[in-house]
Image (cartoon, rainbow, N blue to C red):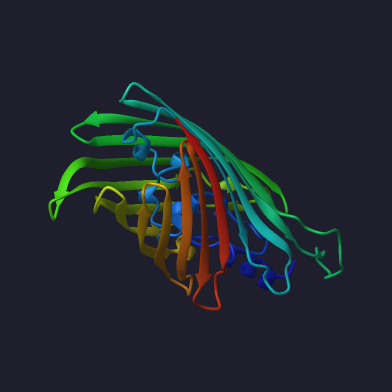
């Protein structure tokens, strides 16, 4: 398999990634599945859906007891690579009383196809890498606006060989919905977490790879300008410190305007090391218990990839 093609494929998946001669890629653990926050510079702290994979504590501050989301993201085709990389995600959340929230979710990533070669450079069968995870999460309201959460799951990765492992996320948040800004009602949330914690994946033959472990810090504020007009802003930073040879810093922020609690438009920017930056934009509709959001992230350099994300949610 061509090493250049492997690296290009991994870059197309965004964020912290790893690539070597066997083509291992674990970007399924770093990609943002939430279309709303993807459109706001990938500032996942501002989640109002897909809570398990964005910000579980945000669900504790909502007045809903149940939430379900599905999403699909498709990345632009890379030259010289057959197929299109896509990420599919589903999650549900249930809040018990006001202090406990439980989550479950599933992620699948794949769609690329490579030509295989043996040690002599002769063609063999095609190579179709994919990964999936099954995840569970829990969030607890500590009191005084503070909460903590944890997520853990099973990870399966099929590359040139198979590997099975586990990934964990630990985080804490603070939220306050009783603020006043310029004499307007406002709310704020702060969030910090460490994600993709876990042992190295063993692909056999002594080939072990670290998970893309990363730290995240973010904040969001929402202001009710009037009965029909609401604005929100969000900022977030991420630092991928594992694997050692793939350290990456990313930061993003965005704005959202919502009319009559029904229609929203969003814009943002995401900075990333190694030319992985994006201009982000999107829109959403919330009607009753249903949510529909879309986002498009336009790359600003030759590295990385443009991609779009669509999500549908239901809560009550």
| Residue 96 x, y percent position in the rendering | 38, 22
Return the residue found at the far bottom: 302
Pick the quarter of the image with the C terminus.
top left
Comparing 259 with 306, the one in front is 259
Comparing 44 with 195, the one in front is 44
| Residue 217 x, y percent position in the rendering | 31, 53
Identify the residue at image location x=48%, y=64%: 246
Identify the residue at image location x=42%, y=41%: 169
Q: Judge left or right: residue 30 versus residue 40.
A: right
In the image, is residue 255 above or below residue 100? below
Q: Judge left or right: residue 215 versus residue 24.
A: left
| Residue 279 x, y percent position in the rendering | 45, 70
Q: Judge left or right: residue 316 versus residue 206.
A: left
Return the residue found at the far top: 97
Residue 122 visible in the picture: yes
| Residue 259 x, y percent position in the rendering | 37, 53
Pick the quarter of the image with the N terminus.
bottom right
Residue 48 sits in quarter: top left
């Amino acid at each position: 398999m061509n090493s250049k093609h492997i690296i290009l494929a991994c870059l197309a998946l965004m964020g912290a990634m790893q690539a070597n001669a066997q083509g291992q890629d674990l970007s399924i653990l770093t990609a943002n599945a939430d279309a709303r926050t993807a459109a706001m510079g990938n500032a996942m702290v501002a989640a109002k859906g897909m809570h398990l994979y964005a910000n579980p504590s945000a669900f504790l501050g909502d007045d809903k007891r149940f939430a379900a989301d599905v999403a699909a993201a498709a990345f632009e085709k890379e030259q010289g690579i057959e197929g299109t990389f896509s990420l599919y995600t589903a999650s549900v959340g249930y809040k018990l009383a006001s202090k406990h929230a439980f989550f479950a979710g599933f992620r699948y990533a794949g769609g690329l196809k490579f030509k295989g070669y043996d040690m002599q450079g002769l063609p063999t069968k095609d190579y179709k890498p994919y990964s999936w995870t099954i995840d569970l999460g829990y969030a607890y309201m500590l009191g005084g606006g503070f909460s903590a959460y944890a997520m853990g799951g099973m990870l399966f990765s099929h590359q040139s060989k198979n590997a099975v492992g586990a990934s964990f996320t630990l985080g804490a948040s603070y939220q306050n919905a009783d603020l006043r800004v310029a004499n307007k009602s406002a709310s704020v949330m702060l969030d910090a977490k460490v994600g993709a914690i876990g042992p190295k994946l063993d692909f056999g033959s002594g080939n072990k790879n670290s998970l893309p472990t990363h730290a995240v810090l973010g904040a969001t504020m929402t202001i009710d300008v009037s009965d029909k007009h609401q604005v929100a802003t969000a900022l977030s930073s991420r630092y991928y410190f594992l694997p050692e040879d793939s350290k990456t810093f990313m930061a993003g922020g965005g704005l959202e305007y919502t009319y009559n609690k029904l229609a929203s438009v969003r814009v943002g920017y995401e900075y990333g090391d190694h030319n992985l930056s994006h201009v982000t934009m999107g829109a959403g509709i919330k009607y009753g218990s249903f949510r529909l959001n879309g986002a498009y992230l336009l790359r600003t350099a030759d590295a990385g990839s443009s991609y779009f994300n669509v999500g549908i949610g239901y809560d009550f």
